[in-house]
Amino acid sequence: VQLQASGGGLVQAGGSLRVSCAYSGRTSRSTGMGWFRQAPGKEREFVAAIRFSTYYGYYADSVKGRFTISRDNAKNTVSLQMNSLKPEDTAVYYCAAGNGIILSAVTEGTAYDYWGQGTQVTVSS
């Protein structure tokens, strides 16, 4: 599976941004895709994920209610709509994909086999 992230940029606190991840290659109902982020000096952290079998979104507590993950099957993209952005959301955002991801593992970066190149999101105060 190949992943190409796009979007991101600079926005003021309270604003919105959308990042997208175009995927190609072999996927199936057992595929899951997620967004992770890494801020300078911090460890990578889970943001959101979606499993192709259900289209249901899973979110970190820090973004719940502000971010929405979605999948466009026709365009082979998974997007993350980010609203009410905060300065602490500033990070490089990475999309990831994996096959056979079970529910209990959607938040674990080690469950994903394929990673995109990352896109910078900067939220100014």
Image (cartoon, grey):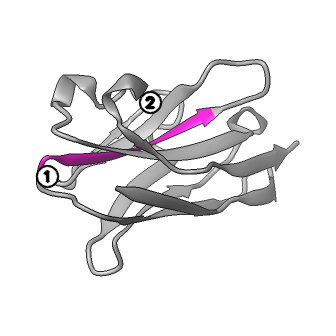
View extreme (bottom): residue: 74
Label 2: which secondary element: loop
For residue 92, above or below residue 120: above
Q: Is residue 125 left or right of residue 111?
A: right
Quarter of the picture containing the C terminus is top right
The picture quadrant where one finds residue 91 is top right
First in sequence: mark 2 vs mark 1: 1
**Distance between the alpha carbons at the discs numbered 2 and 1:** 18 Å
Judge whether residue 56 can be spotted in this image: yes
Task: Name the residue: 35% across, 37% down.
Answer: 113
Task: Name the residue: 68% across, 47% down.
Answer: 85
Which residue in the protein does label 2 denote? Answer: 60
- 116 and 60: which is toward the camera: 116
Q: Is residue 17 left or right of residue 88?
A: left
Q: x, y (%) of residue 110?
A: 38, 24
Which residue in the protein does label 1 denote? Answer: 54
View extreme (right): residue: 125
What amino acid type should be assigned to the residue bearing mark 2? Answer: Ala
Q: Is residue 52 left or right of residue 6?
A: left
What amino acid type should be assigned to the residue bearing mark 1? Answer: Thr
Magenta-colored segment: predominant secondary structure? strand
- 3 and 61: which is toward the camera: 3
For residue 78, above or below residue 61: below
For residue 94, above or below residue 119: above
Which stretch is magenta? 30-37
Q: x, y (%) of residue 76?
A: 34, 72
Q: Is 36 in the magenta?
A: yes
Q: x, y (%) of residue 60?
A: 44, 30
Asked if the residue under mark 1 is in contact with the one under mark 2, i.e. CB atoms within 8 Å, the reply is no
Q: Is 55 in the magenta?
A: no
